Every structure is written in C-alpha cells, then in structure tokens.
Image (tube, rainbow, N blue to C red):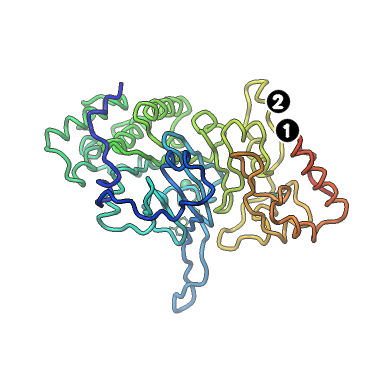
C-alpha cells in the first residue's frame, strides 16, 4: 500500500503556477507515437551544457568545456533511465541540468509536456515539487550542523507547506518509509552511517512527493552490502510511488537490474542507448563493449554474454578539445580510416536501440565510403546485410572493417 498516498500529488498546472490551458507543443507532429507521448514525463532535445574557460590578462572566454554536448532522450513515466560512463563524461552535469539545478547552454527540456528550459524564480521553485535530486556523497550534501529531522523537513518549509505538526507527521511518515527510526530526527548527520545518511537524502527527496528523481551515483560512497539494500529500497519506492528515475552511475553492472533503459555516455554525448537486456546481450558500440568486457562475472551465463576482454586504450580526451571525427576514435579497438574524419550520428539500428558508430553509418554512408578502401566498403556492406538478417553475435569482436 502507498503509505505516502495521503499526500496529494500536485498537478502540472499547480506546479508550474499556470492555468489549465495547454500551450502549443513544438514537438507535436514529430514521429513520436501518440501513446508514447502521453506516457513521456521528460523530453530532452539537443541539450548542451558548456562551462566557459577564461584566460589571458583580460579574463576573456577562450574556450568551453563541452560537458553535455547535444543529448536527446525521453523518459517515460515509471521507468528508470540509467546514464553510465567514465568519470568526467558529463553524467552529473546532465543530471543537474535536466533537474534545472544548472542552466542549459542550449537545447530544450520539457517536463510533463511543458518547456522548463528557461524557468527561473517562482517557476523553478515550483518545478522542485516534482523534480528532486539525490547527490552522490551524502556526507557532503547534508549540512553537518543541522539535525536530521530539520534537514528532511526543509523542502516543506521552503514551499511553506503545512503546520509544524503536519511537517513532523510527514517527516515521521517518510523516515518510516526509508526505514530510518524516528528517534534519529534529533541526531546530526555525522552520527549516522553512510547508508543511513543516504536514506536521509532519499527521505528529503521524497518529502514533497515528487514524480521524478535524479539519482546521481546514490550508492557509490557505500559498502557493497549497503549498496544492495539502498538499491532494493529505491526499487520498492519506485513501484509504490510510481516514481521515474534518472539513475547515474559509472558502473554498468550496478544498473543492470534497476534500469529499464541505459544510455552510454562519452565526452558529453550518448554513444549507445538501448533497453537494459538488449545492451547487455547485444552491445553494438565498441565503447560499450569495452565497458562490458571489464565487468567481473560470477555466473557462467554472464560469461557467455560478455564480449571478449578489450583493454581500454589511454584516457578520455579533454571535453574542451574533443577529437575530430568520432569522439571515441583515439581509444577504439575497431577504428578504421573514416573514424578520425567523419562524425557519427546516433542511428537507430533496431527499434529502441540507437548507436553512434560509423560501423552503422546511417546518413553518413557516402562520407564513410569516401574515406574507406574498397575492401572496407565491401566489409561494411556485408555487415549491413548481416545486420538486416540477424543481430550481431554475442561477444563477436571480428567486425572491424579492413
Ligand atoms: N563547474 C564546472 N566548471 C568547469 N568545468 C566543469 C564544472 N563541473 C564539471 N566540469 C567539467 O565537465 C566535465 C563533466 O563533469 P561531470 O562532473 O558532469 O562528469 P561526471 O561524468 O559526473 O564525472 P564523475 O563520474 O567523476 O562524477 C568534466 O570535464 C569536468 O571537469
Ligand atoms: S566510429 Fe569508429 S572509432 Fe567511433 S566507435 Fe565506431 S569504430 Fe570506433
Ligand atoms: Mg558525477
């Protein structure tokens, strides 16, 4: 039973502080099916977040860190979209920007059908009722000088909701829901374990009864056994409260069981997006293969699915100075002649499975052909044909042309 159900979830109109009339939808008329659009809670189009770099004696802008660089995706109500990738690929920046803790540099964010890209002031405060963030390290995200009860009640005070008695009751309710004894309300965060602190962060995120939560590496600061309990709690909460998650992690194996779909990020872009099962069983992008091949396995079945071990080459490039062509080419074990010259688009290779890689050139076929040898072109065409007939074989690492 939904123990938090007594708290009415705010309607979009209330949250945004606007009337009920529906504005013209700029995405109407795209090829998104109507049913999908009705279920879609978050729509992100060509999102960019660039951090300016200043230099010289006049401190002029000399460049920009392209932390998020043209990312598009939808998140349906009730699902978990996981974002994975190595340190510095832009996961936290993406999460904070869609939650509007950061202002986007470009692109569009639509939440519950409304454009929230440019909200500020009251509009942004209203969005907080529906969109919350749980940060990576509870030790630094919880104020050590405030008691747990007051930290959890904070969003209610900020939004001026309820009397003191109502708030205490609500704090009791959410603490109970995240399995924290109510007596802990008088403690300071430093008197709690890592797992308990993260439960405080989750309780604080839940207190306004949001629809959408960005979970930024919510378990990476915790021991493995505690990690499992927190993940189990998040899954339970999602089911009971119909929550939608953006789950950020550098660990593909961790997200396998919680994610509905997974987006693999590299240098501020998605390299591959697929359902969790599809990504593990049929990875198409060489970067995804490298990440998967590095996961330790315990069961024979997992070993069968895992791509052959591929040692990653070097470190990710500087997002202020990304490489020409495919951003991954300096480290790719399948690179061929076109890879440092042609920029690959994200191409849907199967329904719901998109890949950024010139092995699946999409509209870039002519450009790839221009830089490929005759034998590479022949192999790419044979590969296209094979893909049309059957999916790539599990663990197949033999598809590099040339
Ligand atoms: N406030 C900032 N100003 C300038 N550059 C920043 C800022 N915050 C992040 N960056 C840079 O943006 C890029 C993406 O950082 P981000 O923290 O989003 O990556 P991440 O994938 O979350 O990494 P991690 O796994 O280490 O948390 C990095 O190159 C980082 O150095
Ligand atoms: S485009 Fe080339 S370099 Fe990039 S992932 Fe594909 S094979 Fe590798
Ligand atoms: Mg991060």
Q: Residues within 10 Å of mark 1 (few under 14, many from 20)?
A: some
Which residue ends up furthest to the bottom in the rendered image? 58
Q: Residue at x 47, y 58 (%)?
A: 107
Residue 362, above or below 253: below
Can you give x and y, in whole percent of width and height, for residue 316 in the image?
Answer: 61, 52
SS for dot 2:
helix
Query: Is residue 242 something one can see in this rendering?
Result: yes
Q: Is residue 83 left or right of residue 24?
A: right
Query: Is residue 189 something one can see in this rendering?
Result: no
Can you give x and y, in whole percent of width and height, for residue 364 in the image?
Answer: 71, 56
Q: Are marks 1 and 2 in contact (CB under 8 Å)?
A: yes
CA–CA distance between discs 1 and 2? 8 Å
Q: Residue at x 71, y 39 (%)?
A: 310
Mark positioned earlier in the residue sequence (1 or 2): 2
Which residue ends up furthest to the right in the rendered image? 375
Can you give x and y, in whole percent of width and height, for residue 47 in the image?
Answer: 48, 55
Q: Residues within 10 Å of mark 2 (few under 14, many from 20)?
A: few
Residue 152, above or below 109: above
Can you give x and y, in whole percent of width and height, for residue 14 in the image?
Answer: 25, 46
Q: Is mark 1 within 8 Å of ligand 2?
A: no
Instruction: Report which residue position mark 1 lands on.
Output: 395
Residue 148, above or below 160: above
Q: Is mark 2 within 8 Å of ligand 2?
A: no
Q: How many marks?
A: 2
Q: Is residue 157 left or right of residue 83?
A: left
Instruction: Report which residue position mark 2 lands on.
Output: 304
Along the viewing direction, whichever of 95 and 365 lies nearer the viewer: 365
SS for dot 1:
loop
User: Which image quarter: residue 105?
Assistant: bottom left
Q: Residue at x 17, y 29 (%)?
A: 169
């Amino acid at each position: 039973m939904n123990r938090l159900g007594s708290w009415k979830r705010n309607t979009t109109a209330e949250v945004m502080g606007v009337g009920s009339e529906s504005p013209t939808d700029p995405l109407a008329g795209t090829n998104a099916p109507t049913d999908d659009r009705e279920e879609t809670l978050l729509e992100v189009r060509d999102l960019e977040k660039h951090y300016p770099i200043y230099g010289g004696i006049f401190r002029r802008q000399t460049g920009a860190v392209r932390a998020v660089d043209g990312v598009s995706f939808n998140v349906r109500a009730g699902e978990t979209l996981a974002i994975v990738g190595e340190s510095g690929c832009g996961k936290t920046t993406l999460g904070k920007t869609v939650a509007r803790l950061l202002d986007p540099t470009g692109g569009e964010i639509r939440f519950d059908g409304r454009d929230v890209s440019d909200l500020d002031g009251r509009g942004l405060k209203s969005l907080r009722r529906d969109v919350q963030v749980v940060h990576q390290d509870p030790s630094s995200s919880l104020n050590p000088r405030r008691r747990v009860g007051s930290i959890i009640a904070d969003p209610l005070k900020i939004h001026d909701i309820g009397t003191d008695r109502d708030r205490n009751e609500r704090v009791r309710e959410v603490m109970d829901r995240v399995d924290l004894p109510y007596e802990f309300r008088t403690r300071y965060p430093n008197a709690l374990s890592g797992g308990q602190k993260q439960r405080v962060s989750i309780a604080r995120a839940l207190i306004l009864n949001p629809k959408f939560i960005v979970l930024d590496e919510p378990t990476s600061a915790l021991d493995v056994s505690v990690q499992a309990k927190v993940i189990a709690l998040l899954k339970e909460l999602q089911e009971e409260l119909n929550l939608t998650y953006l789950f950020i992690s550098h660990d593909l194996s961790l997200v396998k069981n919680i994610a509905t779909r997974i987006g693999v990020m590299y240098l501020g872009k998605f390299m591959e997006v697929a359902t969790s099962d599809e990504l593990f069983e049929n990875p198409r992008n060489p970067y995804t293969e490298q990440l998967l091949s590095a996961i330790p396995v315990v069961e024979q079945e997992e070993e069968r699915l895992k791509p052959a071990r591929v040692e990653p080459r070097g470190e990710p490039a500087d997002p202020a100075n990304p490489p020409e062509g495919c951003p991954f080419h300096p480290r790719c074990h399948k690179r061929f002649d076109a890879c440092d010259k042609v920029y690959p688009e994200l191409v849907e290779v199967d329904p719901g499975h998109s890949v950024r890689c010139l092995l699946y050139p999409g509209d870039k076929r002519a450009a790839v052909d221009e830089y490929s040898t005759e034998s590479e072109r022949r192999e790419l065409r044979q590969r296209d044909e094979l893909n049309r007939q059957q999916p790539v074989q599990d663990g197949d690492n033999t598809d590099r042309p040339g």
